[in-house]
Image: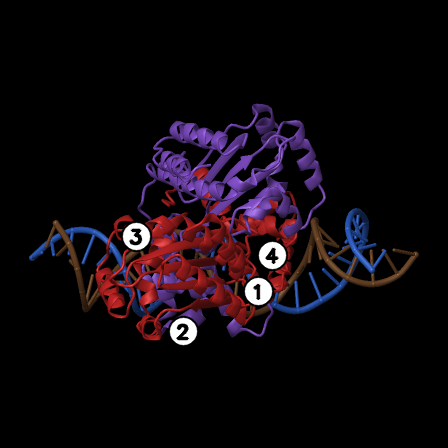
Chain colours: A red, B purple, C blue, D brown
Amino acid sequence: MPLVLAKKLMSEVSSATSRSALFTALGNATRHMSFDHFALDYDDCRASNENDAFLVHDYPPEWARVYQSLGLATQDPVRRTCESSFTSFPWGVSYQATGAVRGDHKILGLSREYGIGDGFTVPRHLPGGVSGSCTFVVRPDAALPVEMLQVADLLGGVALASARKIAGLHVSASSPGLTDRQLECLLWWGRGKPAAAIAIIMGISVETVNQHLKMARERYGVDASQSVLACAIAEGLLGPGDILRWFRTHSGHAVTG
Amino acid sequence: MPLVLAKKLMSEVSSATSRSALFTALGNATRHMSFDHFALDYDDCRASNENDAFLVHDYPPEWARVYQSLGLATQDPVRRTCESSFTSFPWGVSYQATGAVRGDHKILGLSREYGIGDGFTVPRHLPGGVSGSCTFVVRPDAALPVEMLQVADLLGGVALASARKIAGLHVSASSPGLTDRQLECLLWWGRGKPAAAIAIIMGISVETVNQHLKMARERYGVDASQSVLACAIAEGLLGPGDILRWFRTHSGHAVTG
DNA sequence: ATTGCCTTCCCCAAATCTTGGTATGTTTTC
DNA sequence: GAAAACATACCAAGATTTGGGGAAGGCAAT
């Protein structure tokens, strides 16, 4: 494929501003790259409306139906590899990488019956529960177009960025957020410190600590601090490592991660 | 750049099995792509040893020192963009995308004094606190090699995968994990349900719920359930969305995310 | 068949959090 | 300059969690 064509396809995909436009652009790119089908899936747990997750694909309808109705997503080896891979990967490697599990071959065999052969998947994640993947597949009797995989990688990336933009158009950018002190209290609380200890650490009174936690709860409209903690992690206000690492360095206990 | 050279550089980077080999390969690639410096940073909060985070770069030593000693990482606009971008980006766009914040121009100006001009960053994340970035920069008087950016994108991706592999060689793959029931209790508890309510939901007695939570605490060696919750999220046992989404659908409250 | 693990149930005392208020001084913002 | 938001501090009753025990049945693996 000439380089100019690859660039044209990428700009086409990245300039899509609606699901249908993205569908068209991706379908076009898929054919140009000698793939037979594509599937793009985007999921943002932070988004607060019906656009939080979406899926555009041109898989055979029967396969999509079977996949969903059997709940195959939970045992899909490709999906599992997505969870732990920085880079795009041809499906073949996912069986070696994550170790084939019972049931994997069943999915593989089943998909072939529905016209899904080998595939190439581009996974992407963001901190706090945003994730997506863009997959290109060939028919059961065809081989992956090896010379196209790098283009597919780039294209999958921009397609996912595009999807995020499209979904994001409807997402309120405003996060309630927490004040510095609230977050600080929450962090220590998440580390298992009772309010009394937090008060000493932060050099303020116990009541103030409780007040900060109280305000944090009200901010999120929940009535348990543990929920605030989960929300704060989901929104990236706290990194999981802020808590996990602290245990490693400040406790004799295991917390074997 | 000829395509073969690009592939050769990528395979060189991806076959690195030590930090020093990665350093060499990346430096080599950087020069071939007409960049002047590179920096790769990898961070896995779940890893339990000294290899959980690493940084290889060939920035001017003075800049690295200034950056670290002033704690610029927390206010770096590039780093902020990394948190919210699926794709690689030239630094120029990060100021528009995230909105310039006071202090951004200060960092920008300061970096130029130390020989850091414009840059191009490839961000990558995985669920549960694993993240990395690979950056290529040019001197202050040079422009980004636009025709190289796609190669840089691919190369950054494989470099990060390589870094993960190198760090991962020393990471224990074993996670303590929680049993199904423990996880189920923890999930409802994270959603703010008191043990009494969880008992009704799960159809078991309150004592059993408390027992499950107790065992979960012991498993992680911590004495607060909120810490277990944080650990479980960090390890991907629970998705942030499991909690966040539940509030949206099952409470009249806001939880405006 | 024994061992280990998971699940289930029970009790109790102490520590802790949650909810409902009120209040003052500072900083930011309009 | 006034309003809003923030950080700080206090109190008290009631709900909840936590830590310390003990115990039984099912299930898988050695």
Q: Earlier in the sequence, mark 1 or mark 3?
A: 1
Q: Are discs 1 and 3 located on one and the same chain?
A: yes
Gap in angstroms between the C-alphas marked 1 and 3? 32 Å
Q: Position of residue B35 (x, y in %)?
A: 54, 32
To the question of a shared chain for discs 1 and 4, the answer is yes
CA–CA distance in space, label 2 to label 3? 37 Å
- Dot 2 alpha-carbon crowd within 10 angstroms: few under 14, some 14 to 19, many 20 or more: few
Taking A92 as reference, is A171 above or below it?
A: below
Q: Residues within 10 Å of mark 4 (few under 14, many from 20)?
A: many
Front tag of 4 and 3: 3
- Amino acid type at circle 1 is Thr
Q: Which residue is mark 2?
A: B201
Viewer-nearest residue: A94 or B28: B28
SS label for mark 4: helix
Chain for disc number 2: B
Separation of residues labelled 4 and 2 (CA atoms): 27 Å
Output the chain of dot 3: A
Residue A197 visible in this rendered orientation of the protein: no
Please give the chain letter of the residue carrying mark 4: A
Give residue A213's mark.
Answer: 4
Secondary structure, mark 2, is helix
Q: CA distance from mark 1 to mark 2?
A: 43 Å
Q: Nearer the viewer, mark 1 or mark 2?
A: 1
Give the residue drawn at x 44%, y 44%.
B154
Q: Which mark is residue A94?
A: 3
Mark linked to residue A17: 1
Query: Which of the pair B234/B137 is nearer the observer?
Result: B137
User: The residue marked by circle 1 belongs to what chain?
Assistant: A
CA gap, disc 4 and disc 3: 44 Å
